[in-house]
Amino acid sequence: MIQSEHIQRQDPQIAEALHNEEQRQRDTIELIPSENFVSLAVREALGSVATNKYAEGYPGKRYYGGNQHIDIIEQLAIDRAKQLFGAEHANVQPLSGAPMNLAVYAAFLQPGDTVLGMDLAHGGHLTHGHPVTFAAKVFRFVRYACDPETGAIDYDAVREMARREKPKIVLCGFSAYSREIDYEKFHAIAKEVGAVSMMDMAHIAGLVAGGVLKNPVPMMDIVTTTTHKSLRGPRGGMILCKEEFAKAIDKAVFPGLQGGPHQNQIAALAVALGEAMQPEFKTYAQQVVANAKVLCDVLHTGGMRILFGGTDNHLILADVTPLGLSGREAQELLDSVSITINKNMIPLDPRKPMDPSGIRLGTPAMTTRGMKEEEMRVIGSAILEVLRNPTDATLHAKVRDEMIALARRFEA
Ligand SMILES: *Cc1c(COP(=O)(O)O)cnc(C)c1O
């Protein structure tokens, strides 16, 4: 149970909604790859007195007094981030992923300048210049793609594009791509055209921290990451970079883009980074990947078309149209049996973003709850059973009961 006696007394409407949300989380098989469950220690820090404090500036250089304790907290977050990822510099103030990437663009680009990034339907993220974003109105985004069947990136083609388009930033990073990236090659291409190399590791930061995926930080000029996905911290963003870019990044975050940092969030991040440094976190990261491979195999064997030929990380992008369904239909059917995933565009998708061909699933959340390969097999089979029998209400009721019971056996 959440500690909510004060909310309950003062604001029953919010207390009730929070209580219901807690129950929903407890009773759901959570396969949205960007979600996770933070520890109680992280939640305590988020709900702490640090939320009361204004601290514009950076440790030791604040525009407000009374920051002697806040400085210790932020400096610990910075030091732990640098140690965990081997970074020369860390900025822990970005309020979330979108402002963190905007800060990097603001640090290195003038309006009209070009960014070379991954095609959004091939795994790139909205904040990498989707036409609906503010960044896309100000900067010019050009895109490379990967082979939908194997996930291979044609680095010669990327180099050709870089030579032709003259980007100021060469960006790799993704939210729906399941393979490893060759950071050396991306960095070399960026240097060849005089650009800054940037990796957005939002999805995989926990797997990098846990040592199961290559660490881009020693290679790339700038690495951005959200802190609330596989890294299992509070919602937030973080920018890691080489010392030579530290000033530009810090100025772009504050005062360039943000005002007072959320010090409760930074305290919670420090706690989460401390957790990610423990040996148990390595075991966690290994299990996340092992679980994803098993789930991927089950879905592939059951008739889904797996994009990029499999997974090296926590993510699975699958085309469900071979089962006679759209991504939206699959999402709604699975929602009805207490399994949450999300619909997603696939490369060269003939369908529309609100009703695409694919679904995206991931294992960080349920691995935190303690699930292993055996549970992934059960869940994968349940997913296939429901999607193959989209109108069988009796079956759906049975699977729903089973999934709720399974979720309850693995409490957060
Ligand atoms: C989630 C994500 C973001 C954005 O993070 P928000 O905190 O939702 O703003 C940025 N980049 C990538 C690659 C992501 O996966």
Image (cartoon, rainbow, N blue to C red):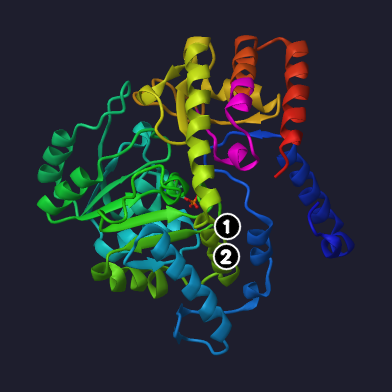
Q: Which residue is painted at 27% across and 32% down in the image?
A: 145
Q: Badge 2 is on which residue?
A: 265
User: Alpha-carbon neighbours of circle 1 within 10 Å: few (<14), some, or many (≥20)?
Assistant: many
Q: Position of residue 233 (x, y in %)?
A: 56, 55
Q: Position of residue 32 (x, y in %)?
A: 56, 36
* Circle 2/circle 1 CB separation < 8 Å: yes
The numbered mark at residue 234 is 1
Secondary structure under tag 1 reads loop
Q: Which residue is painted at 28% across and 44% down in the image?
A: 117
Q: Where is residue 49 in the image (x, y as percent from the top left)?
A: 68, 75
278 part of magenta stretch:
no
User: Which region shows up in magenta?
Assistant: 360-378
Q: Which residue is painted at 38% across and 34% down in the image?
A: 177
Answer with left or right where residue 64 lies relative to residue 379. Answer: left
Q: Residue furthest front?
A: 279
Query: What amino acid is found at the position of numbered circle 2 in the picture?
Result: Gln
Q: Residue furthest bottom?
A: 65
Q: Quadrant of the C terminus?
A: top right
Residue sitting nearer the eye, 210 or 102: 210
